[in-house]
Amino acid sequence: MNGIRHLFIPGPTNVPEEIRRAMNIPMEDMRAPDFADFVLPILADLKEVLRLTHGRVFVYPTSGTGAWEAAITNTLNTGDRVLMSRFGQFSTLWVDMATRLGLDVEVVDVDWGQGVPVADYAARLEADKKHRIKAVFATHNETATGVTSNIAALRAALDAANHPALLFVDGVSSIGAIEFEMQDWGVDLAVAGSQKGFMLPAGLGILGVSDKALAAHERATMPRCYFSFDDMIRFNDTGYFPYTPATQLLRGLRCSLDMLLDAGMERVWDRHHRLASGVRAAIAEWRGCSLVAQGPQWHSDTVSAIRTPADIDAREVIATAYSKYQTSLGSGLAQLAGRAFRIGHLGSLNPVMLCGALSAAEMALRDAGAAIVPGAGVAAAQEHFRATTAPVQSRP
Ligand code: PLP
């Protein structure tokens, strides 16, 4: 009677009806003779989404955090020096994991609102003549702050320093939504999760692994078991898994890959850019609000983190949007708690859905006391969407 609840958090994202239906099937035999015919094309198509022709893709029954751990434990040795940066909650958690797993982490702290400090990394790599740094980590899209970093520039810095370190990239909130070129950017380990650009429930950790990383794996001695590449390779080569796979999620993944690849990755990236630009046009009209991202070079096309005016508690905005307008906005994490809220604009979305999110945010901001002109942001987004949206020809 009250209509639907609206989900505008940056993951889990909305699951399209086609995917929900694809997952609604009876349990199946994961050792059936024809199961491999289903699995092998999924692994091949994931490489297409990642833009990888060599190497491998692994799909673990886990979340993005598990795929982070798989990447580290399979390719590094305890005590290895790694170069990382912190500029939001997720890059911070990755540093925490690397430290707890026994790596020697060289951390660069960056203002929340900026991203991977490429020039700083470049100087450190240049100075590391003995190549003690074994891996360089980058959070491509920091979901907590709505900041996207330039991975191609980071690859160029590694090449300019002639440095052999592995390049680890967290693409949890970028892969399947914004440009990601695993091979061209020389990414060795690319981490993704099912619940964001892939428009699925949480539960699959997806990992792209380059040939260089597979070679590093041969020498790596860090303890691992559940996430072992060896076990996965042995079984995946014939189209099976070393333990019970999440078959329903794989059915959903099949549907998601069809949707993404039928559309074409460039069109998927363009669509996210158009949607994100409309959201940013709205935010620009919200008096006293601003993006956490400190400039257009950092703008994320999958999530916007929005600072509320100094006297407005963002938690109140989020709570009002939820209880009064049936709309979930993303919360401000860690140092942004109370100061910012987030709008996720990735996955299965269209302009009218986003106008709803913006409308709910405007009403909740006004309820909390912000001096927003009613409809100002929505109007700006509408004009942007009117000017940039073509009729949908095929499945969204
Ligand atoms: N990295 C980024 C950029 C994320 O946004 C998230 C989750 O939102 C994670 C890692 C952790 O992934 P998960 O929650 O699937 O374990």
Image (tube, rainbow, N blue to C red):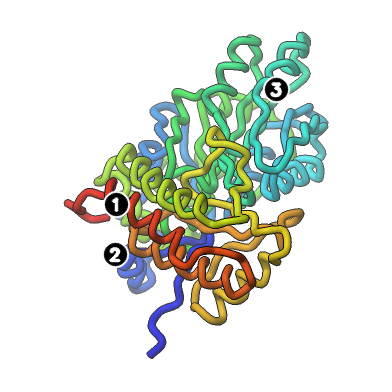
The amino acid sitting under disc 3 is Tyr
Q: Closer to the camera, 372 or 105?
A: 372
Residue 231 location, x and y as percent?
56, 44
Residue assigned mark 2: 18
Which sits earlier in the primary sequence, circle 1 or circle 3? 3
Q: How far apart are marks 1 and 3 (CA)?
A: 37 Å
Residue 379 location, x and y as percent?
38, 59
* Relative to 254, 130 lies left or right: right
Residue 319 visible = yes
Q: Please rate how many residues cluster around mark 1, counting C-alpha atoms within 10 Å: few if below 14, some from 14 to 19, many from 20.
A: some
Q: Please rate how many residues cluster around mark 3, counting C-alpha atoms within 10 Å: few if below 14, some from 14 to 19, many from 20.
A: some
Mark 3 CB lies closer than 8 A to ligand 1: no
The amino acid sitting under disc 1 is Met
Asked if marks 2 and 3 touch (Cβ < 8 Å), the reply is no
Asked if marks 2 and 1 touch (Cβ < 8 Å), the reply is yes
Residue assigned mark 1: 259
Residue assigned mark 3: 121
* Relative to 392, 77 lies left or right: right
Please state, as top left, top right, bottom left or bottom right, where the C terminus lies in the image.
Answer: bottom left
The amino acid sitting under disc 2 is Glu
Q: Closer to the camera, 176 or 369?
A: 369
